[in-house]
Image: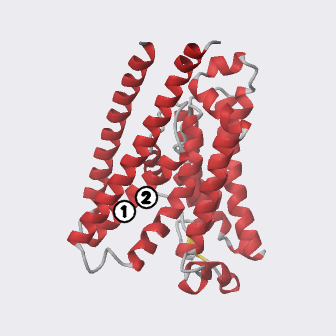
Amino acid sequence: MNAEQAVATDSPRRFSVRLREARNLGLVGVLAVLVLIGALSQPGQFLTTGTLVLVLTQASVIGVITVGMTFVIIGGGIDLSVGAVVALATVWATTRSTQSFGIGGIVFTAVAVGVGCGLVSGLLIAYGRLVAFIGTLAMLASARGLAIQLSQGRTQTVTTSNQALVDLGYQDSYVLGIPPLVLIFAAVAIVGWLVLNRTTFGRRTYAIGGNLEAARLAGLNVKLHTCLLYVLSGLCCGIASVMLIILTSSGTSGNGNLYELDAIAAVIIGGTLLSGGRGTLVGSVLGVLVFTTISVLFTLNNLPTAVQQLAKGVIIVLAVLVQRRASLYSSERNSR
């Protein structure tokens, strides 16, 4: 291959990288605008350490779920069951029998439930050939129903013998002023970034999401990998459920309501294509921070929840339109 051919081959990659960087910088700009709006609308409340900690803490639970969702969507799938799986994990982990095994029993049960639900969804989709939308929708209904059945519609509180787990949510447990939940989110995001960008698993995820048939012809075990993506999503749900138990000191079947909407929205505005094959974890994390900041702004300004949901819907539509426009421009540029 001569120099001109090398440049021509590398040009689309460079353009894709520049587009990704521009999108991330755009999200940073949006965050800056939101901070400015908060400073102007609530100058005495928004620009405080307490509000910053609140934003990061609220972003932590949904952020961990978003990490798993990013992998699934880049791999060409979607997971609508994350909120229900979180609810089931919190309920199962806070039953009296589970709590009798101590904090280790609570954490193990929550993670095991998340992984188990992800495995079932993955098997149905990869080997049962169910469409991802249908398979995870069925898991959503099943997990939520089982959570209601286990809890009998009641809130299950963490017992005093396991109070040390709940104490992680209090200020006394902060590390250098940073809540442990934020550190967990940061650790999950960093590990996720390394797996996605520095391992064979990540490269295979992009390949399968970009062109499933080509990946299969190249010798990749598409079914196994697809199944593992949903297991990974379930693992993130299990970790998030432990974090939610720490925050609320309880487990209830109502937990995780609309978490799937928030996670998918964060992934989309972060630049991940719904069709798969393209996306970044950095963008998804920035997307989570944008949505969380918006929610805190709405709360501080006493705006109703309905308006928050409306704003999120508008943002999702705009993000998809921008994605489509950028994708068309990229295709036209590469075809020249």
Foreground pick, 331 / 74: 331
Q: CA distance from mark 2 to mark 1?
A: 6 Å
Q: Does residue 213 appear in this view?
A: yes
Secondary element type, mark 2: helix
User: What residue occupies the far left of the structure in this picture?
Assistant: 41
Quadrant in which the N terminus appears: top right
Secondary element type, mark 1: helix
Return the x and y of residue 71 as percentages of the image width and height: 59, 41
Mark 2 neighbour density, 10 Å: few (under 14) some (14–19) many (20 or more): many
The number of discs equals: 2
Quadrant in which the C terminus appears: top left
Task: Please name the residue shown 71% across and 28% down the image.
Answer: 223
Residue 293: give its label.
1
Foreground pick, 73 / 207: 207
The image quadrant that residue 303 belongs to is bottom left
Q: Amino acid at mark 2?
A: Leu
- Left or right: residue 32 compared with residue 119: left
Q: Does residue 123 appear in this view?
A: no
Task: Please name the residue shown 52% across and 53% down the image.
Answer: 83
Residue 274 lies, with reference to residue 168, above or below; the image says: above
Foreground pick, 148 / 331: 331
Q: Amino acid at mark 1?
A: Thr
Return the x and y of residue 60 as percentages of the image width and height: 52, 63
Task: Please name the residue shown 65% across and 71% down the image.
Answer: 94
- Left or right: residue 329 compared with residue 57: left
User: What residue occupies the far right of the structure in this picture?
Assistant: 101
Residue on which disc 2 sits: 289
Task: Please name the residue shown 57% across and 13% down the image.
Answer: 5
**2 and 1 marks in contact (CB < 8 Å):** yes
- Left or right: residue 193 compared with residue 221: left
